[in-house]
Image (cartoon, grey):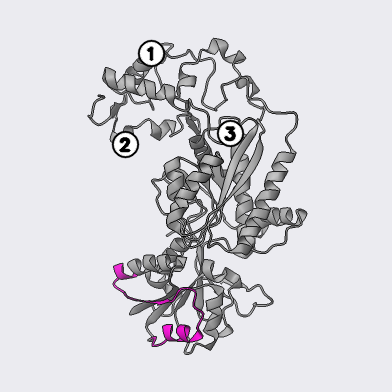
Amino acid sequence: MPSTVPLRGYRDEGGVVEGLHAACVNCHRPSGLGTTEGSVVVPPIIGKYLFRSHSTNVQDMSLPHVSGYRSTREPYTDETLARAIREGVGPNGRTLSYLMPRYPMDDLSMASLTNYLKGLSAMPTRGVIGDTLHFATIITPDSDPIKRQAMLDVMEHFFADKNQFIRGGVRPLQSSREIEYRVSRRWQLHVWQLSGESDQWEQQLRARLAAEPVFAVISGLGGRTWAPIHHFCEVEKLPCLLPNVDLPVVAENDFYPIYFSRGVLLEADLMAKGLFGQSASLTDSPHIARLVQVYRQGDVGESASSALAALARASGIKVENRPLQHELSDQKEMTLALGGLAPDDALALWLRPADIQKLASITPIPTRVFISGIMSGMENAPLPEAWRTVARLTYPVDLPELRKVRMNFPQSWLRIKHLPIVDERIQADTYVACGILAETLTGMLDSFVPDYLVECVEAMVSHRLVNGYYPRLSLAPGQRFGSKGGYVVRFDTQKDGGNRQSIVADSEWTVP
């Protein structure tokens, strides 16, 4: 058996890395296809690149181009690879970069590592069939049907556009000389509509994946929970890119799921900053005796309220949760939930528009009110006039005036496709997700490895300018949320008009 001693690497200057910090994956990435960072090029280390003889590379039509591969490099053998890892000497006898640690591995461990690298990415890629890339989008049974259709309309038109530009068939790259030749493949969308309770979803997903192998999951739409889909994609090593979910799974050590933001959990942090954090000056008095929270049982606000409650208690503030029964719409229930509030109480509302409208008959109005922007409809929240003068909304996207230029692209595209705007954020996020996928695949050429897809999304997303609702998207290893901040806003009652409310920021863009 290979050694059980923790891995340790040494550098010429005396530096030492050990354990997880010494793992090859940190630099060569999970795919083994390497990366670039500034002027630093980390080469691929999978077998077909390490042991490929450059003398036959020009004639080889099966070797995809990756940025770190040098076709003129001498091929490794088992012996020269062992020397490179142990001593930092390449197959041509030259010293490797100082960034590459030297690992004093025993023979058995070295043989195990060599065999692993030879087998890495050696199998055919799931969901890449002939000249077609297969993708799935996943929809939970409790998702809004209007949002569902809005998302699917965007995806179907985007996929049709993509396939219209394919001409003259498809072939892989022949060599690095053809780096400018971009491989085009058809895109096929599979809609995986789930049914039943959430504990049945993973079984359904396994059956769908077996029947319809896909390369990645793109976009998607969730309701009260996305956790089973997140877990399924992580276990199956299936990239899950930018679904439309308000309650994502916070597990930054997971690799395959990537989200736009932390949704209502980010809003909980923004509320905490506004109510009892350093930005508590948003309210007339920073002293809060009690935080009262109202939410519908079973909705995403229940999880968000738990997150905010933990932050409040950590600040020494009492918390009282007043849940509303799931899917009931009794006005009396709302009146009771908002009764008995003291002047030094703060109120947090995690409610949908139908419940927000019921606030019209509630008196007296508390002086410190925070409302989930995501759940209530953001600037279009149907908040009664009297409440708009005191309420603050958490707003984990860019302000309408600031995102106007970025929104020109998705809005113009929707008009060209004759798609009415029925849910602008869902449609814009879906358009951006498809655009990120298209740009990433172009840069990957035909190196279709699921891990490499995720790595390339990490690398390219921060360079995009067209991000729709978000001022900036950025990712790095160990980050799975592209947008990390938001505002606290209030209604500008002097400028309100029509169906679209005017809002102004009560805080700077804040990253909790």
The amino acid pointed to by label 2 is Leu
Pick whichever, 321 or 317, lies toward us: 321
- Badge 3: residue crowd in 10 Å (few <14, some 14–19, many ≥20): some
**Residue 342, percent across and down?**
37, 86
Which is nearer the N-term, disc 2 or disc 1? Answer: 2
Which residues are drawn in magenta?
312-341
For label 3, the residue is 128
For label 2, the residue is 20
Which is nearer the N-term, disc 1 or disc 3? Answer: 1
Q: Marks 1 and 3, Cα distance to the nearest angstrom?
A: 34 Å
For label 1, the residue is 80
Pick whichever, 397 or 190, lies toward us: 190
The amino acid pointed to by label 3 is Val
The amino acid pointed to by label 1 is Thr
Verify whether residue 46 appears in magenta: no
On screen, residue 40 above or below 85 = below
Q: Marks 2 and 3, Cα distance to the nearest angstrom?
A: 32 Å
